């Protein structure tokens, strides 16, 4: 009888302890701090408040250092005594298998994500991806993914302008020469400017004629246009050919060191990395 009473007391005690266990944060993904980062810039990139990031990482101050790994919370919480966390982990993200011709920029657009968020979720330091690669897609930005995917699929049946394999290669070589070291948006932007010119009545009506028009692109003059295209530049050229235009219809681009008074007088439509895009 005494043994039964002791057993019952032990069960009650275990239940009470389970009810008193503290809540623990649910983390959406990790972020590795790079040079130049601050809590403010990371908050802007991830959409998570500074105080939430500090609380999730037990930070008493604002000092960060390159290489530091931060837990990025998803704003939800759970308890050790609640239902199993597996369904939450499953709902926290979706997966996407990279297909031939995909680029990180196009995938981000498809799921209505900022490129930086997709890179953070997959701990990517660059934009290069390969067919068959599994990417994590944060669930917070996938609510409108289905209609977006349908729209992209419909518009991606054919390029927005006629294009041969030679045109694609030439366009990608121009992207490599003009913006090879720039972010993916900047590279797509260079290709988009060429395509916008083809569609404009102010410029020639083929990719080749636009690129080789007199006194338009310095890589044509200095011979850099003949260098092989990078894989990233090819992806950027394809993205632009199938409708991506992060420049908002720009007809010109230049880097932020240019002193050309004509280019500087144009209304700016976008800015990525060191590249500036302008309309007429």
Image (cartoon, rainbow, N blue to C red):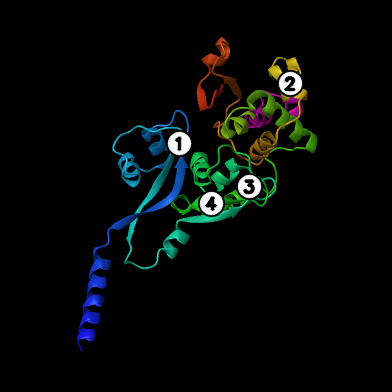
**Viewer-nearest of discs 1 and 3:** 1
Residue picked out by circle 4: 136
- The image quadrant of residue 162 is top right
- The numbered dot on residue 155 is 3
Report helix, strand or loop for mark 4: strand
Quadrant in the picture for the N terminus: bottom left
The reply, left or right, for residue 79 in relation to residue 180 is left
Label 1 with label 4: CB-CB less than 8 Å: no
Q: SS of the residue at dot 3? A: helix
* Residue labelled with disc 2: 224
Residue 35 placed where, x, y %? 47, 29
Q: Marks 4 and 3: which is nearer the front?
A: 4
Task: Let me know if residue 95 appears in the view.
Answer: yes
* Disc 2: CA contacts within 10 A as few (<14), some (14-19) or many (>=20): some
Q: How many marks?
A: 4
Q: Is residue 206 visible?
A: no
Q: Label 1 to label 4, Cα distance in Å?
A: 19 Å
Give the residue displayed 72% in from the left and 25% down from the top.
210
Q: Earlier in the sequence, mark 2 or mark 1?
A: 1
Q: Please, what secondary structure does the residue beneath circle 2 have?
A: helix
| Among numbered discs 1 and 3, the one appearing first in the sequence | 1
Q: Position of residue 135 (x, y in %)?
A: 57, 50
Mark sitting earlier along the chain (4/2): 4
Q: Which residues are magenta?
A: 191-210
């Amino acid at each position: 009888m005494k043994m039964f009473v002791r057993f019952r007391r032990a069960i009650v005690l275990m239940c009470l302890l389970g009810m008193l266990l503290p809540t623990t944060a649910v983390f959406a993904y990790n972020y590795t701090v790079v040079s130049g980062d601050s809590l403010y810039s990371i908050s802007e990139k991830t959409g998570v408040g500074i105080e939430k990031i500090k609380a999730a990482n037990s930070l008493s101050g604002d000092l960060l250092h390159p290489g530091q790994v931060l837990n990025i919370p998803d704003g939800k919480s759970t308890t050790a005594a609640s239902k199993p966390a597996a369904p939450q982990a499953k709902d926290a993200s979706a997966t996407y298998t990279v297909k031939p011709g995909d680029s990180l920029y196009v995938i981000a657009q498809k799921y209505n994500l900022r490129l930086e968020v997709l890179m953070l979720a997959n701990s990517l330091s660059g934009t290069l991806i390969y067919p068959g690669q599994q990417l994590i897609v944060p669930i917070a930005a996938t609510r409108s993914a289905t209609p977006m995917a349908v729209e992209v699929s419909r518009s991606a049946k054919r390029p927005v302008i006629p294009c041969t394999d030679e045109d694609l290669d030439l366009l990608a070589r121009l992207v490599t020469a003009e913006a090879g070291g720039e972010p993916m948006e900047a590279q797509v932007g260079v290709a988009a400017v060429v395509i916008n010119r083809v569609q404009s009545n102010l410029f020639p009506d083929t990719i080749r004629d636009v690129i080789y028009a007199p006194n338009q692109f310095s890589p044509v003059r200095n011979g850099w246009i003949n260098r092989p295209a990078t894989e990233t530049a090819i992806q950027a050229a394809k993205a632009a050919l199938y409708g991506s235009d992060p420049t908002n219809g720009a007809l010109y681009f230049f880097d932020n060191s240019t002193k050309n008074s004509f280019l500087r007088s144009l209304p700016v439509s976008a800015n990525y990395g060191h590249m500036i895009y302008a309309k007429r």
